Amino acid sequence: MSLQLKLNLIITSLLIFLLGVSAYFVIENAREDVRAEVNSTANLVLHLLDAEIVHYTSDYGWLNRYSSGETSIFRLGKLGDIRHLRIDFYDANGRLRETNVDARGTHLKKLPPAWFIKSMDLSSIGTEERRKSIVLNGRFLGDLVVTPDPSYEIIEVWEDTVGLLGLVGVFFVLMNVLAYIAVRYTFKPVKQILEALTQVEQGQFNSRLPNFKQIELQGIGQKFNAMADTLQLSTQNNHRLTQQIIRLQEDERKNLAQDIHDEIGQYLTAIHVDASAILGAKKMATAKESAGAISNITRQMMTTIHELLQRLRPRVLDELGLGLALAELIHSWRQRNRNIALIHNINSDLGQVDESVAITAYRVMQECLTNVSKHAKAQQLTINVSQDDRYVRLEIEDDGLGFDATKNSNGYGLAGMKERVQGLFGSMTINTSIGGGTQITVLLPKQNNQFSEAITHEHD
């Protein structure tokens, strides 16, 4: 069930409840009004009849005759306008002589439905008859019987209730229509939000939400747009980094091919020439000279191959471990950069470190040292490498020129390092400002269990 439908149902239920409560109080008040009206009318009529009886017993001209010749004592036939009461006169033999019912007989056909009369609960209204004995000169003439009849008042209440309920019904329908329109208008932006989310899901990160008028939705729109901006920027950076990585790989392959062709090929040519000289030598001295040349070329060739392999993968990590490998890297850098004061504190025993973590730490340190040499123009460099039970921590700080961290660099260095560290569920923070030096802190997990768990969960 949608939220819009739920709100409409809640509003409808509330209106129905209010309608029921209103109807209850209307009926309660109507019951009290009927009771008061009937009792009041009965008391008044009885009082007037008492006065009439006194008059009749003192005046013998009270006998009235109709045109038909019948004698009427109280002329009850003319009392049809007396509401809420039935007045009957019974003679001494118990026969009905006069009544006011005939004049009201047609009106009783307009009584409201039985369920409404039942809901009025007329049991609380005093409907018991009241009798007055008529005695003249000691002679019993009959009984005057007054019976409360709330039918008139109930009819009026029913008519008023029907009018009121009709008005309430119109109000109920209008309120539901207005509530439906208001809720629909309020939730109209939800469709826009869903469409925007669908576009983002499909990789269209340029999707944006408008500035909604609803205060509650303004925050959602702003947060969504900020998220889309971040995703779009991240995607652009990833595409740029991918292209940079591909270009660097191709450049590295090109350099390796050039080095192999120029140096290894040259060495092999020289070896071939000297070997041919040995084969064609007629003197031992000439052969020894060529053999010595082959030995020297071989040593130079081994050095070149070692450098090439070092560029492809630092073997020192396998041979010495991460701590000593970093120390050897820093020592080599210091030999080439005597003009920069170096303060370093490296824990030589960093314990068991995952291979991917060790390579990343080594490459990050290598990139930082290269950046200090090429760009920082620093006077002093401080390096700290420490560890705890779970993490390896690298801290590199220089007092160089610094840079504006808010501007994207066209190079692969810092962005590539950060991506590489985050790919291992590590963290990398860069604090720098123009002219204020640079401080880089890298935290890497020793064992890359989170990466393994992520892959396991993905396969599951």
Image: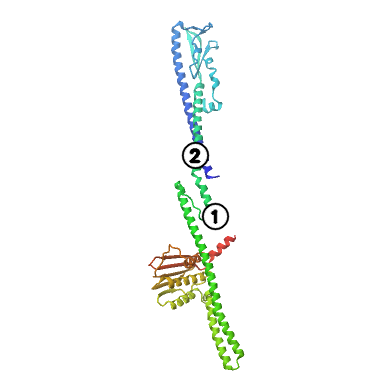
Instruction: Say which amino acid is labelled 1.
Output: Glu
Q: Which residue is mark 2?
A: 179
Identify which residue is drawn at 49% across, 75% down: 325
Identify which residue is drawn at 60% across, 87% down: 276
- Cα separation between marks 2 and 1: 33 Å
Q: Which mark is nearer the camera, 2 or 1?
A: 1
The disc, 2 or 1, on the residue closer to the chain's N-terminal end is 2
Q: Point out the image quarter for the C terminus.
A: bottom right
Q: Which residue is mark 1?
A: 201
Q: Nearer the viewer, residue 385 or 61?
A: 385
Instruction: Say which amino acid is labelled 2.
Output: Ala
The picture places residue 152, in percent across and down from the top left corner, at 50, 21
Describe the element under mark 1 as helix, strand or loop: helix
Identify which residue is drawn at 53% across, 28% down: 119
In this figure, which colouring scheme has been used for the structure? rainbow
Q: Nearer the viewer, residue 141 or 82?
A: 82
The picture places residue 8, in percent across and down from the top left corner, at 52, 40
Q: Nearer the viewer, residue 83 or 213?
A: 213
The picture places residue 87, in percent across and down from the top left corner, at 50, 15
Q: Point out the image quarter for the N terminus.
A: top right
Up/down of 233 relative to 413, above or below: above
The picture places residue 379, in percent across and down from the top left corner, at 38, 73
